[in-house]
Image (cartoon, rainbow, N blue to C red):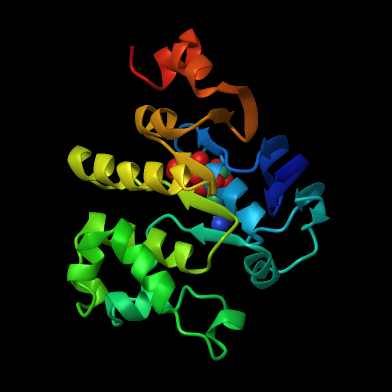
Amino acid sequence: MLAADGIVVAYGGNIAIHQVSLKVGAAETVALIGANGAGKTTLLRAISGLNPLRSGSISLEGSDLAHLSSDKRVALGIAHAPEGRRIFPGLTVEENLVLGTTPWRRWGQSPADDLARVFDLFPRLKERRDQLGWSLSGGEQQMLAIGRAIMARPRLLLLDEPSLGLAPRLAEEVYERIRLIAAEGLTILVVEQNTVLALAVADRGYVLETGRVVLEGSAQELRQDPRVREAYLGR
Ligand code: ATP
């Protein structure tokens, strides 16, 4: 479904992503793991069109994305739940969610079905639908960010560190929901420092170090790889 080939992304003269190639198949969940500063967020932002490519190509179901704005990529079905949640603190939960519907859907169509779907997945958001964004806990904000991305009815969901800043129990709860979304057949690319959680939901994964893919394989292969165990699983 998604194919990135030899992509290079730079900030001024500093190359953050060196010739990275990766693939995400339809209905697959793929994890992108790596330490702080490895380039995971940069790569995700390049896929959603927020960071320009220096070279290389990205395509979604064979259509070239490289020259499309991030808005056009959203319209093609790419939704991005960014790191740091970026919800609107002064809007209610429901208002935040409705903002996730794509512009063409807002025209004369009610978001009620999509809201109901998100509320089924995240009952806590339903209980808090009239509460303002700022008053949510970290885990609830993360759920809201994912829910807002789902409102766009994406074909490819990009998740940036869904466990960031969450207590272990909450991080597991968020990942339980990601597992449910994946089981519905949505294609997911998840960036994560918490390798245990990410490899528990993923089918496959890539390990990124200083902007390069150093390992790739099935989630099971990566969990058993001595380098992954030592560097990322603390064993
Ligand atoms: P983290 O988990 O800490 O977010 P990451 O793997 O997502 O790390 P990136 O945030 O993509 O890594 O950063 C990759 C490299 O690019 C780092 O060296 C970082 O300092 C650099 N970088 C990231 N954003 C910018 C920016 N806006 N301007 C300049 N350099 C940047």
Residue 202 horizontal/vertical position (percent): 48, 32
Number of marks in the image? Answer: 0
Does the rendering let one see residue 210? yes
Which residue is more in the foreground, 78 or 67? 78
In the rendered image, the quadrant that contains the N terminus is top right
Quarter holding the C terminus is top left
Q: Residue at x 71, y 69 (%)?
A: 69
- Residue extending farthest top: 226
Image position of 106 with respect to 155: above or below: below
Relative to 58, say whether 140 is above or below: below
Picture quadrant where residue 24 is located? top right
Judged left or right of residue 120, residue 4 is right
For the point 31% across and 42% down, which residue is it? 176
Q: Residue at x 57, y 31 (%)?
A: 208
Q: Is residue 164 visible?
A: no
Instruction: Please give left or right for residue 48 compared with residue 8 in the image.
Output: left
Residue 95 image point, x, y percent: 35, 81
Q: Is residue 74 above or below residue 1?
A: below
Question: Percent x, y for residue 145?
Answer: 38, 62
Residue at 66% across, 39% down:
25
The answer to whether residue 126 is left or right of residue 86 is left
Left or right, residue 212 beside residue 235: right
Q: Nearer the viewer, residue 65 or 176?
A: 176
Q: Toward the viewer: 6 or 145?
A: 145
Residue 182 screen position, x and y as percent = 46, 44
